[in-house]
Amino acid sequence: MEGEEFAVGCLLSIKTTLGDEFEGQIISYDRLSNILVLQEGLESGPRRNMRLLKANYIKEFSLLSQDKDPLDVKKCFLDLTGLQAREDSAIRQAEADSERFGVGVTSEAQTLFDALSKTLPVRWDKTVIVVMNEVRVSSPYLPESVRGGTPAANERVRKVLEFERKRIQTRGTSQ
C-alpha cells in the first residue's frame, strides 16, 4: 500500500483492522510515519471531518475516484477554537486518568484503590491512598493501616478494605 495508491486527491472506501468503515479523500500522506490525512465523506461546506490514519490499520480499501484538488483553500475552514477546546478537554481527561494509577504500588494496592474509588472520592499521595481528603491508607493497605478522618469515615474505609480483601482472597483461591 504505497506510492500511487496513496496519491493526494484519491477518494477511497476504507475498512480498518478495528472494524471502522468510511469513505475519505487523501489530503496528505507521510511515508516516514506511514500516516494518511483523510477528509471523511463527500460533503462540501465550511466544516469537514479530518482523520489521521496509520496505514498499517487499513484492512481493505478501494479506489472510488481521483480528484485534482482535495483542499480548495477558498472552501477550507478550521474551527481552531473548537479544536483547542477538544485538545484541552482531552488533556484534562488524560491527566485525571493518570492520577488514578499509583506509582510504585502493588497490583493489590491498585485493586483496593479502584474498589474504594467506586463509592468514595480517592487519590494517591505517592504510595498512600487518600480517601475523602482526610482518611489515609498506607501500605500494606490493611484495615489496621487506616488513619485520620472522622470515626465514621474511618470505619467506612475499613469495611470497604475488609470486603475487597476477602474478595481478592476468594478470587485467588478459586483460580
Image (tube, rainbow, N blue to C red):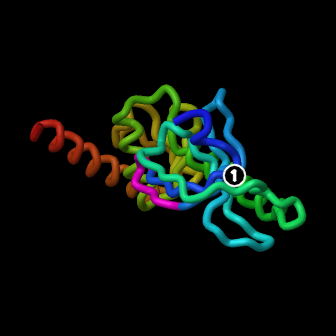
What residue is rendered at 89% in x and 65% in y? 74
Look at the numbered disc 1 and give the secondary structure of its residue: loop
Closest to the observer: 103 or 72? 72
Name above or below for residue 69 compared with residue 2: below
96 left or right of 157 in image? right
What residue is rendered at 66% in x and 50% in y? 26
54 left or right of 166 in image? right
Q: Residue furthest right?
A: 74
Picture quadrant of residue 75: bottom right
| Amino acid on which disc 1 is placed | Gly
Picture quadrant of residue 169: top left
Closest to the observer: 80 or 15? 15
What residue is rendered at 78% in x and 55% in y? 69
Residue 45 percent location from the top left of the image: 77, 73
Q: Quick check: can you spot residue 72?
A: yes
Picture quadrant of residue 48: bottom right
Q: Quick check: can you spot residue 148?
A: no
Which residues, given as a range, are shown in magenta? 16-22
Closest to the observer: 117 or 64? 64
Q: Which residue is mark 1?
A: 9
What residue is rendered at 60% in x and 58% in y? 65
Decide whether residue 147 is among the magenta residues. no
